[in-house]
Image (tube, helix red, strand yellow):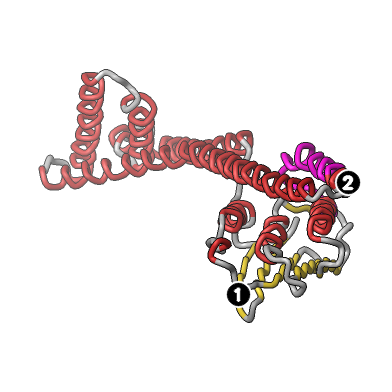
Amino acid sequence: MLQFSDRVIKRIKFLIASIFIIYIVVRIIRTAIYTLPHDWLFFITSDAIENFIGATIALAIYYYVFKSTRIWLRIVSMMLFVLILAILALSKDFRIHNLYSFDQSFDYFTNFLGKTLLFYFFFYGLNKLDAINHYRKLKIELDDARAQLLRNQMNPHFLFNAFNSLYSLCLKNSSEAAAYVLKLSSMMRYLTDETHFNKVPLSRELNFIKGYIDIEKMRFGKEVSIQFITNGNVNGGRLIEPFLLITLVENAFKHGFYTNDKNAFVNIELVLEERALFFCVENSVFEKQHFQESKRKGQGLNNLRQRLGLLYPKKSSLEINNADNRYRTELKLTLS
């Protein structure tokens, strides 16, 4: 969305208003040179004076009359403006036809009134530039706040799963529990120090995912089938919204390793081409027992879709395919 600073908006308004004023003043001066002093009536009823009076009335209505809280002032002002336009219409009728005609004068009056309304909408639209700019700023701030809220929702979700894994290791009296805590503390530093930024280097996000995979290997054993492949220059300085890709990885482990089946697997592949990022996560799917049943589409994927809609509108797509005992998610992004 195109966004201008307040200074640029003020300059645009000043430029448009200046051009408008200069145009009216030039028209008045040009008409005065050709008509004054020998034909005052023609000067007063000329198009230049009509435009000047109409613009002045529209300006007074927009900036003073409608903003006044006094009802009587509004009524008196509107009656005065109508009277001025009526006198102008009668004067023009007399100058052209040398007599007064109700029908002809009324036509002139409606013409003047129409011009005044056009000038009013001109001032209205010009000053709405501030409102439009303010609305866009509010929308950007609101989108940032919503994105931050969704991101903050992800942190407790990740920690909940991480501490569940740590609990499992402790129950087994595993010697890797200490290493698990050390690895988790390193990931916590990423969560607290960097995820409050709007964008982070892609390499940092991938290191976080690698740390998460190491933790899951401690939990399920190093012999489990877990692959993480990257193609492209992931250290080239591309930026990404933090804590975005981990959602698909976490989802795959949640639904790919809920059993101890030796055929369970999680395959992760990232391809970076120029500014296009392709992130594919595939995991095994086994038939669950009745006590393991749960809805596949949980909060994580809904959260991810909302964040993509806010942060990468028209620059992202998320496809899900569940077939042949495989669950596959494909995310495409256009990065900065």
Rendered view: 126 above or below 81: below
Residue 301, quarter of picture: bottom right
Amino acid type for the residue under numbered disc 1: Asn
The residue where tag 1 is placed is 322
Q: Nearer the viewer, residue 320 or 234?
A: 320
Is 5 left or right of 183, judged from the image as shown? left
Label 1 secondary element: strand
Question: Which residue occupies 89% across, 48% down?
Answer: 175
- Magenta residues? 181-203
Label 2 secondary element: helix
Question: Horizontal and vertical percent for residue 122?
Answer: 41, 42
Residue found farthest to the bottom:
324
Question: Which residue occupies 60% across, 62% down?
Answer: 314
Given this view, does label 1 or label 2 mark the residue nearer the observer? 2
Question: Horizontal and vertical percent for residue 136?
Answer: 54, 43
Q: Nearer the viewer, residue 71 or 11?
A: 71
Residue found farthest to the left:
102
Which of the two discs, 1 and 2, labels the residue nearer the N terminus? Answer: 2
Labels 1 and 2 touching (C-beta < 8 A): no
Amino acid type for the residue under numbered disc 2: Ala
Instruction: Report crowding for label 1: few under 14, some 14 to 19, many 20 or more residues within 10 A (C-alpha).
Output: few
Which dot marks residue 179? 2
- Our reading of the magenta stretch's main secondary structure is helix
Count of picture labels? 2
Q: Is residue 14 visible?
A: yes
